[in-house]
Image: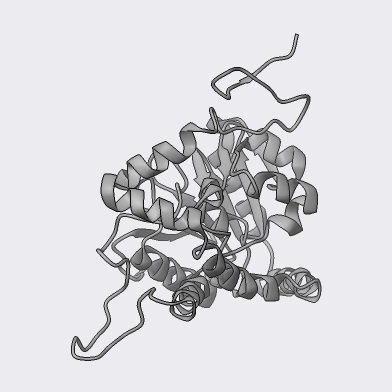
Amino acid sequence: MTVPAFEHVLYEVDAGRARITLNRPEKRNALSWQLQRELCDALWEADNDRAVHAVALRGAGKSFCAGYDLTGSPDGLPPRGDPERKYRGYRSFEDDSWQLEREQRFRMAIFDMHKPVIAQIHGHCLAGGTDIALLCDMIIAADDAVFGFPPARDLGALPNNMWLYNLGPQWAKRLTMTGDTITGREAAQLGLVMKSVPGKLLEAEVEGLLDRMAQIDIELLSANKRIVNLGLELMGARTLQRLAAENDARGHQTPSAAGFRKTAMEKGVKEAIRERDAKFGDGRARANGPEIRDERGFLIDPD
């Protein structure tokens, strides 16, 4: 079967399913503008293909996705066409909002497409990785996967926000206000993901669910996905995504975000992230029991 060719996404159709794999393992599948555009195109291709009943979204290499790519082109912008014309950058709140909203439209394909998407999460699912995972219809994670949004510590707010609808307000605030992480097992306990399994069983778990969906008429799958998502829309979920992009632009105006950008320009992005996260020790939250920490900020087990 002929399928579209992509540079940063692997796309295959087999036995009633499409497997879409983020394929920048050397960057831990960091979301560049091009990868997001290709992901959007691959999702709509799967939605249009009547041989596909459901989609598995996964990552190549050691992680699902470590976040947005902060080390791309000098200005972080996609190609602009005519070099004689003046295009938007990030010079103003309005320009920043516009750029964030454009990228968000790529990711919203997961929510808007008619067929179900299952996120298969291993390794790190951080920042932008959570943005795409939480838009999926179901998330199955390895027990030892790592979920969190560390950039909320200094770089901005979340440009997509489905945490509230999965976790409820208290845990959504606990995790996004600190950037702390939880394991896949804890994420399943709290409702951030549907379930977690041992890593060696992750692929089989996802494929088993896809096998079952492959037996269901695609129009029935669509009807049952869309009624639930319409319910989420009635609860404001889609409007909140639109507002989240603008809210992230607001977060980019804060002194801490300016400080991060300054450090990144002077010392590089990796050092800016290291300096930010060093203050938070192991950067973990604990879903059960007290959070007792040593002098370095690492969780320790209570006596």
Q: Nearer the viewer, residue 105 or 96?
A: 96
Q: Residue 115's quadrant in the figure?
A: bottom right
How far across and how far down the image is residue 152, in percent? 56, 51
Left or right: 84, with 62 as reference point = left
Compared with 38, 121 (above or below) is above
Q: Residue at x 34, y 40 (%)?
A: 271
How far across and how far down the image is residue 259, in percent? 42, 52
Compared with 184, 259 (above or below) is below
Compared with 290, 47 (above or below) is below
Left or right: 175, with 15 as reference point = right
Question: Please, which residue is most extreme toward the left here?
Answer: 84
Whether residue 185 is visible to the viewer of this picture, yes or no, is yes
Q: Residue at x 71, y 44 (%)?
A: 174
How far across and how far down the image is residue 129, in percent? 51, 52
Whether residue 114 is visible to the viewer of this picture, yes or no, is no
How far across and how far down the image is residue 154, in percent? 51, 50
Left or right: 119, with 42 as reference point = right
Question: Please, which residue is most extreme toward the front here?
Answer: 255
Q: Nearer the viewer, residue 118 or 90?
A: 90
